[in-house]
């Protein structure tokens, strides 16, 4: 069952309180290189990113935030470490501020950031990270999920004492078991929405798998209100993986989804090539369509009947399915063209 939470609003996106689980990503270009970062944000948005976070490491980046904000349409989150003054300044521009209680410099600094967020009417994400916990908690608990949960709970209690509850939390470690445990410990004790992620997850391959296991298992337990897949590399890949995680756990549907068999000696055409090309060609299509690409008649007809469009390998011509029914036979070299034509007709 979905965990009940309070709701926050980030720009025009609601998080928690029954809202759909949203997708976030983070830019990896210099914030001060305004043209480049705006271009990257537009690209992220085009691929389905719903909230974007940018690093704000200095005063020039705060200035750049204003220009960025004017030129994008998805909500903008300012990511601040160490210098609370940057967070205070960024609050008048960004739609949300992310701070880390382990490195912002103590409660007095947090108080200033809360005041600025309150004045601006925006939420704050408290992003606890195993790599930058408060020293006393690290001494008491070691680098454990208990220390992460305690850090988040401590921050929650202090911010509540300032009469501010417009907050969301994340508790990230770079390994899956500690991340899951930390989120669960915190989720059991609060009603705040949660931003899920595995910190520094790694490359597309390892990071994608770690994120799918960690974020996916929490979502299946009803925990999590917005997600960010952290990958070393192009953030567009983060968005693609995030969409796949959300659709795999049955929480959201995004455009075209492809089912394809792993192939074996029975395959009658190059399933992998067709599946990859169709995925690439349909990456930006928003229409929710299910395509089945199957190598032969062993499992092919069953999958093709469930899909909007299907192709099943066969001797003497591959069977093309439309809405669960065989429509015609298609030669190997016409499969991709035929599927694309049908997608465009639907
Ligand atoms: Fe092999 Fe046919 Fe199954 Fe594909 S559908 S894996 S080709 S048996």
Image (cartoon, rainbow, N blue to C red):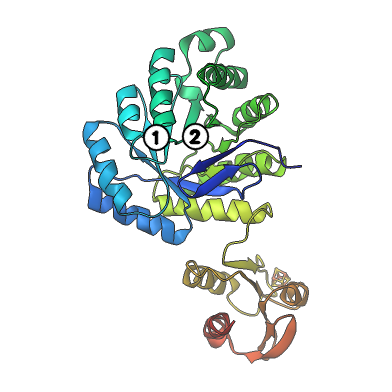
Q: Is residue 151 left or right of residue 74?
A: right
Q: Is residue 36 left or right of residue 139?
A: left
Q: Name the residue tied to disc 1.
A: 120
Q: Is residue 101 left or right of residue 94?
A: right
**Toward the viewer: 163 or 84?**
163
Quarter of the figure with residue 220: top right
- Residue pictured at 60% horizontal, 46% vertical: 212
Report if residue 177 is visible in the image.
Answer: yes
Q: Name the residue tied to disc 2.
A: 199
Please state the horizontal and vertical placement of residue 327, each as a whole percent of the image.
Answer: 69, 90
Point out the image quarter for the N terminus: top right
Report if residue 83 is visible in the image.
Answer: no
Q: Are marks 1 and 2 in contact (CB under 8 Å)?
A: no
- Residue pictured at 75% horizontal, 85% vertical: 325
Give the CA separation, mark 1 to mark 2. 29 Å
- Residue pictured at 57% horizontal, 17% vertical: 157
For marks 1 and 2, give the one nearer the viewer. 1
- Ligand 1, seen in the image, is in the quarter at bottom right
CA neighbours of label 2 inside 10 A, class few (<14), some (14 to 19), many (20+): many
Please state the horizontal and vertical placement of residue 174, each as a whole percent of the image.
Answer: 52, 31
Q: Is residue 151 above or below residue 207?
A: above
Please state the horizontal and vertical placement of residue 27, each as a whole percent of the image.
Answer: 36, 46
- Residue pictured at 64% horizontal, 41% vertical: 17
């Amino acid at each position: 069952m979905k965990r009940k939470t309070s709701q926050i609003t980030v720009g025009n996106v609601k998080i928690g309180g029954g809202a759909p689980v949203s997708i976030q990503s983070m830019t990896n270009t210099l914030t001060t290189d305004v043209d480049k970062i705006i271009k990257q944000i537009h690209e992220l948005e085009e691929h389905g990113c719903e909230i974007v976070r940018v690093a704000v490491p200095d005063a020039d980046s705060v200035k750049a935030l204003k220009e960025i904000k004017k030129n994008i349409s998805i909500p903008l989150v300012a990511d601040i470490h160490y210098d609370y003054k940057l967070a205070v300044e960024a609050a008048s521009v960004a739609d949300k501020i992310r701070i880390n209680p382990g490195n912002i410099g103590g409660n007095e600094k947090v108080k200033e950031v809360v005041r600025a967020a309150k004045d601006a009417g925006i939420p704050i994400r408290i992003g606890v990270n195993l790599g930058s916990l408060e020293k006393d908690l690290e001494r008491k608990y070691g680098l454990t999920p208990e220390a992460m949960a305690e850090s988040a709970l401590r921050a929650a209690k202090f911010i509540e004492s300032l009469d501010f509850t417009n907050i969301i939390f994340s508790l990230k470690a770079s390994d899956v078991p500690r991340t899951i445990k930390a989120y669960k410990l915190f989720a059991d004790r609060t009603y705040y929405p949660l931003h899920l992620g595995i910190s520094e997850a790694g490359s597309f391959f390892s990071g994608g798998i770690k994120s799918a296991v960690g974020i996916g298992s929490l979502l299946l337990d009803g925990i999590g209100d917005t997600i960010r897949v952290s990958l070393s590399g192009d953030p567009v890949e983060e968005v693609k993986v995030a969409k796949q995680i959300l659709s795999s756990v049955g929480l959201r549907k995004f455009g075209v989804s492809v089912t394809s068999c792993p192939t074996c000696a029975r395959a009658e055409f190059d399933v992998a090539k067709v599946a990859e090309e169709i995925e690439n060609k349909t990456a930006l299509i928003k229409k929710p369509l299910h395509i089945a690409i199957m190598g032969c008649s062993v499992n092919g007809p069953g999958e093709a009947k469930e899909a909007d469009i299907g192709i099943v390998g066969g001797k003497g011509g591959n069977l093309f399915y439309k809405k669960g029914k065989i429509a015609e036979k298609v030669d190997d070299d016409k499969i991709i063209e035929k599927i694309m034509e049908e997608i465009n007709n639907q």
